[in-house]
Image: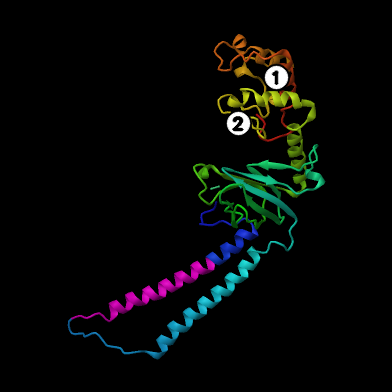
């Protein structure tokens, strides 16, 4: 955000910022003229010794001025507003990409277009929560829906703010001038988690968007890979999920370390076991207190097969090459 109440970084936001500034400046000019005139007249024509207040009854010129000028102002603001609204509501011209956005208590789910570049190994298409990734200088249409109550999608710098209403599809287009990360917030009170219902809009340079899509696909594919299905399902069916988070799955525990990229970590068990390989993962899961007596992780008495399957899956939880947020 810049020093001003709005800092438009895309054409959608700029359309509303333009009209904001025009009206703001006009309002300041009116304020100065009206209040200035009032103060001036009150001072100059005040009653004082040796001076009696003058009486006026009607003044055609002044009355004409303060009728015609505000009328013209209101008409021009209307014309201007309709013109900007046309731009802001133009959800069809020049749309390069359409993303389905679903609000639910209390997160957003972004489903990318049904195109080959977003296709997963099971034939479905990329659908990711929390972050929305788009290319720069590209008009992206968001088709909003809601699973439960009314939410509202809003990324202030990029502009536009649109409700996601259950049973009634709505649309909003967005476009960003510069690559970067933009913060947004659900703008309709939707329950106790409303304040935490954030949006992170990540804008990529056009040349890098494809690389991002490849990484995102690889991660999504990893979570549905038939080769590690048994291990994954075993993990997700056990108490593991109560303590650990693996993004993209139902495992969302906060007690233990996040395992989303466990295979890219340098060590596990708080540094006791390194590197993170099949042998060490197996040793750890088999009997954690035997490796680290003070650990909070219990011995779940899993069978060797269960441990083997889980380890095979955990070994695939790796960062992509050059991934920025890799632990
Ligand atoms: Cu969703 Cu507020």
Residue in view at x 64 percent, y 19 percent: 268
Residue in view at x 67 percent, y 52 percent: 178
Separation of disc 2 and disc 1 at Cα? 21 Å
User: Residue 69 appears at what percent x and percent y?
Assistant: 48, 81
Callout 2 environment at 10 Å: few (<14), some (14 to 19), or many (20+)?
some
Q: Is residue 126 magenta?
A: no
Residue in view at x 76 percent, y 38 percent: 217
Residue extending furthest left? 49
262 vs 79: above or below: above
**Would you say 55 lies left or right of 127 here?**
left
Q: Which residues are magenta?
A: 21-48
User: Which residue is more in the foreground, 230 or 74?
Assistant: 230
**Would you say 201 lies left or right of 46 here?**
right
- Quarter occupied by residue 31: bottom left
User: Residue 324 appears at what percent x and percent y?
Assistant: 68, 35
Residue receiving disc 1: 276
Residue extending furthest right? 116
User: Which residue is more in the foreground, 11 or 82?
Assistant: 82
Judged by depth in the image, the label closer to the viewer, 2 or 1, is 2
Residue receiving disc 2: 252
Residue in view at x 57 percent, y 53 percent: 156
4 vs 281: above or below: below
């Amino acid at each position: 955000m810049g020093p001003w109440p709005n800092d438009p970084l895309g054409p959608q936001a700029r359309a509303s910022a333009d009209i904001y500034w025009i009206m703001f400046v006009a309002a300041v000019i009116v304020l100065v003229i009206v209040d200035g005139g009032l103060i001036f007249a009150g001072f100059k024509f005040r009653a004082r010794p040796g001076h009696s207040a003058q009486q006026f009854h009607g003044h055609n010129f002044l009355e004409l001025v303060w009728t015609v000028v505000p009328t013209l102002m209101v008409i021009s603001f209307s014309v201007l507003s309709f013109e900007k609204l046309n731009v802001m509501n133009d959800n069809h011209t020049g749309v390069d990409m359409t993303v389905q956005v679903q609000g639910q208590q209390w997160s957003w789910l972004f489903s990318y277009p049904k195109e080959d570049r977003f296709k997963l190994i099971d034939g479905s298409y990329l659908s990711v929560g929390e972050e929305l990734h788009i290319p720069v200088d590209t008009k992206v249409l968001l088709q909003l829906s809601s699973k439960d109550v009314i939410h509202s999608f809003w990324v202030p710098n990029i502009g536009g703010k649109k409700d996601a209403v259950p049973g009634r599809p709505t649309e909003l287009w967005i476009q960003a001038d510069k690559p970067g990360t933009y913060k947004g917030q659900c703008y309709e009170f939707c329950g106790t988690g409303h304040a935490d219902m954030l949006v992170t809009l990540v804008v990529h340079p056009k040349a890098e968007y494809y690389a991002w899509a490849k990484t995102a696909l690889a991660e999504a594919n990893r979570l549905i890979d038939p080769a590690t299905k048994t291990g994954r399902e075993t993990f997700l069916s056990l108490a593991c999920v109560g303590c650990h988070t693996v993004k993209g799955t139902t495992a969302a525990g906060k007690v233990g370390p996040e395992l989303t990229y466990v295979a890219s970590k340098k060590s596990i068990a708080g540094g006791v076991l390194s590197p993170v390989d099949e042998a060490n993962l197996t040793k750890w899961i088999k009997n954690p207190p035997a490796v680290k007596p003070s650990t909070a992780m219990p011995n779940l008495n899993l069978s060797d097969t269960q441990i083997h399957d889980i380890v095979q899956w955990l070994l695939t939880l790796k960062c992509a090459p050059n991934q920025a947020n890799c632990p």
